[in-house]
Amino acid sequence: MRIIRVVGIVFLVSVFYSSALCQERFVEATYDLYSKGQLIGRDVAQFHYHQDGFLEEVSGVSTISTSGITVIVNHYAALAEGARLIEYRTELRAAGQKQIVTAHPQGNDMLVSVAGSSKVLKGQADAVLMDNNLAAHFQILVEWLKSGYGDSRSGFMIGPIFQGALSIEAFPMPPRECTIEKSIETDFWLVRIGSNVAQIWVDSDGRFLRVRNPRGGYEFRLTDLSCPPDAIPLPDYIDMSTFQEIPGNLQVRNETLSGLFCIPNGEGLFPGIVLVHGSGANDRDETIGPNKPFRDLAHGLATREIASFRYDKRSYAIPDSVSPTEWDLNVETIDDAVAALDLLRTQAKVDSTQVFVLGHSLGGFAVPYIAEKDGLVTGFISLAGNTRSLDQLTLEQYYYLGALDGLSADEVERESASTFADLERIRSGNFSDDEKLHNAYGFYWRDLMTRDPASKAVTLPFPALILQGERDYQVTMEDFDGWIKAYENAKRTDYTAISYPELNHLFLKGCGEPNPGEYMLEGYVDERVIRDIAEWISSLTPVLNWSIY
């Protein structure tokens, strides 16, 4: 297996050798299209293979019904060896209307036409064809990978309907099993296309069987194909028999936030830690897609005899509890976290003198302020905590994700002009407290823009642990360096900073260009993160010295 780098969206694909067949052959296959588990369409495709073994024609009829509208797509593509496009034509019919889409190479370029409007994609004559609404086109993608077997590849995917080109990266994963009359082992690939991720199953004959896009919630699979549910085994660092989870309620402002204590078995006393969420409406596990980073942290740390408390964030559980124009970081995060620290100290098996606070993302930004307000923490931990302002991070993410989806900086600015105008006003401070700017009110932004977590941290008498994934595109290594520079400039040595090359914003392993699609692929927080947190806490937790007796 090997890594293939292309430029664009990510999908799972398998690569294989195929012997020359020495004769033409025709193959027909029927694929069902599902959206969030519901059958919404079918693609009946025909594949014509050249006598030298390569795929030279793909055609078929796809029917998709959604939102009360049925779309019928007649599609045809002629290909040269290596899945290079010769000609492409699609006719879409819906609600009595027809639209023609065509594409063909023109010198070194690709000419794409949609409903008579043409666009030249410079330097894309060799780009692989892909309309991700057509199952048959995933077979073209497989053929393209097949043609480059044994070599790393660079290239682009063209999407004729959106008249653009995207980069692709493909990564081999462990084989999976599926059933078509009998159980078979399939190759399994992860592919990024632009800012999306998908998984592709391919059989030993090179036939595309299934594609799943977890972020978009859609899936193509060969009719009559069945695959067992995706299940990631529990990581070795979690032993569910070593701890108990006990419901607990956090009382703040005469309101209740539900949570969970995770308490190790045994008599104690155990050090304890409160887990503080990132931005947005987060539950106690900080659930993102199929992933639950705070659950993983709590279970992993409890296995290592560290108690914890995690709770539903105010913006998730009771978002209307405070007027939006009075919502600031104190209301959103700090006050509830301080109350959670007090609550954790009351637990019989928790050492009240050894309690820590951990924040992730915006929570990592907030932990110095939580530690200051609490005044009793033994230390604080920032996971992917930003040291730069949120408006700056937002701006960078728009450019980054736009580039993944094939947009120039100018195109990003045009498409996001309203957001960029809001961010500029936030930076300038020229707004009123009751004015809404980029999903929050001025009162919130004014409070946030006055805060400098790294400068605050070095004024506090608490040791700190700073952790950062190097594949994080939301909070980057520039923020990580911001923490380090602040401590160095203050000549403070009571901090530890660790970065992890393979980890993303959720501290899960990933590969290729970081992208939001990978958050929809199930995984667990990397074991090294659990280990480093536990060892750091242990280094600050006193051990009884029986030799004094």
Image (cartoon, grey):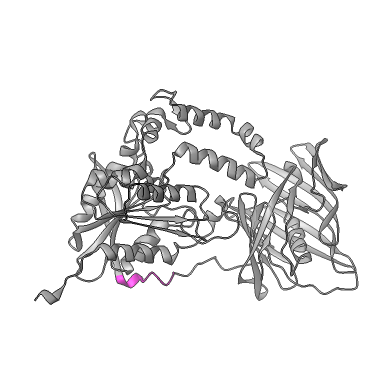
Viewer-proximal residue among 477 and 408: 477
Locate the C terminus and report the quarter of the image it occupies.
bottom left
Image quadrant assignment for residue 5: bottom right
Q: Position of residue 50 (x, y in %)?
A: 89, 65
Q: Position of residue 219 (x, y in %)?
A: 63, 56
Q: Nearer the viewer, residue 299 or 168?
A: 168
The correct choice, above or below, for 26 with respect to 515 in the image is: below
The secondary structure that most of the magenta stretch takes on is loop
Q: Left or right? Give the position of 263 relative to 522.
A: left
Q: Is residue 475 visible?
A: no
Front one among 162 and 178: 162
The residue under the point 81% across, 53% down is 126
- Measuring from the top left, give residue 525's x and y in whole percent: 44, 61
Task: Count the marks.
Answer: 0
**Magenta stretch encompasses residue 514:** no
Which region of the structure is painted magenta? 235-242
Instruction: Identify which residue is drawn at 44% across, 39% down.
Output: 389
Query: Residue 304: percent from the left, percent from the top?
Result: 32, 69
Q: Is residue 479 visible?
A: yes
Q: Quadrant of residue 180?
A: bottom right
Left or right: 288 as drawn, with respect to 283 = right
In the picture, which quadrant includes the N terminus?
A: bottom right
Give the quarter of the image for residue 26: bottom right
Q: Nearer the viewer, residue 76 or 150?
A: 150
Is residue 237 magenta-colored?
yes
| Residue visible at 91% across and 71% down in the picture | 23
